[in-house]
Amino acid sequence: APAVGRAADPAAPPALDARRDLSASALAYVGDSVWELAARARLAAPPRHLQEYRGGVERLARAETQAAVLSLLERRGLLTGEEKDLARWARNSRNARGAAPKRFSRKHGTGDARPYLAATALEALVGFWFLERPGRLQEVFTIVGLASGEPAAGGGGGTEGQSPLLETALEELERPEPPPAAWAASTTAAARP
């Protein structure tokens, strides 16, 4: 198999170019593993029961959480043009569109695959950073709150005076969404005598 990243030995075979040589699905596959490993490392201390580890990792690795993190990275202007293009490419890839889990399907779930597609885009970015730009991965994981040695809750990770993006994303997900204006108007009108 060809080497990944930049080859240190000029006589070595050419290195694999992650963006050119891998599909969006392959990058997301790698990124999913890196994200989950970082989530596990973040939750490793203090010691907990096994179920707490599993629940915590599932919460941090859910598509909705990853989609919220990507949205925050985009809204705060923390992605380069190249990174935005890669995320768009991964989000729109044919494999991502056909692979959404049942809970996002119209028949069995919400019918809204956008969180899954955004999570695939973030995972592809993480895979790209892992393979091609490990320094950038560390930088983004520090901003997000998944960097090595980050505490499991509070204090650290974000920029000065801010909580890590991961905590902000989780807080946004826990806020109840207001009902659509049309629904609120129809229920108010029906309640009048």
Image (cartoon, rainbow, N blue to C red):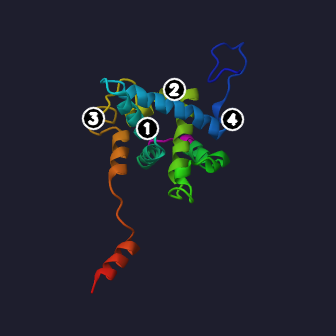
Q: Residue furthest bottom?
A: 193
Residue nearest the observer in this picture, 103 or 186: 103
Residue segment shown in magenta? 78-83
> Would residue 97 be seen by someone viewing this image from the given angle?
yes
Residue 154, which numbered label?
A: 3
Q: Position of residue 92 (x, y in %)?
A: 62, 50
**Element type at mark 1:** helix
Q: Is residue 139 above or below residue 14?
A: below
Q: Is residue 17 left or right of residue 157?
A: right
Q: Residue at x 73, y 18 (%)?
A: 13
Between circles 1 and 3, the one closer to the viewer is 1
Is 79 colored magenta in this rendering?
yes
SS class of the residue under badge 4? helix
Which amino acid type is marked by label 1?
A: Glu
Which residue is under mark 1?
58
Across and down, in percent, residue 36 comes to 47, 32
Distance in Å between CA atoms under marks 3 and 2: 25 Å
13, 94: nearer the viewer: 94
Label located before the other in sequence (1 or 2): 1
Query: Dot 2, crowdedness within 10 Å: few (<14), some or many (≥20)?
Result: some
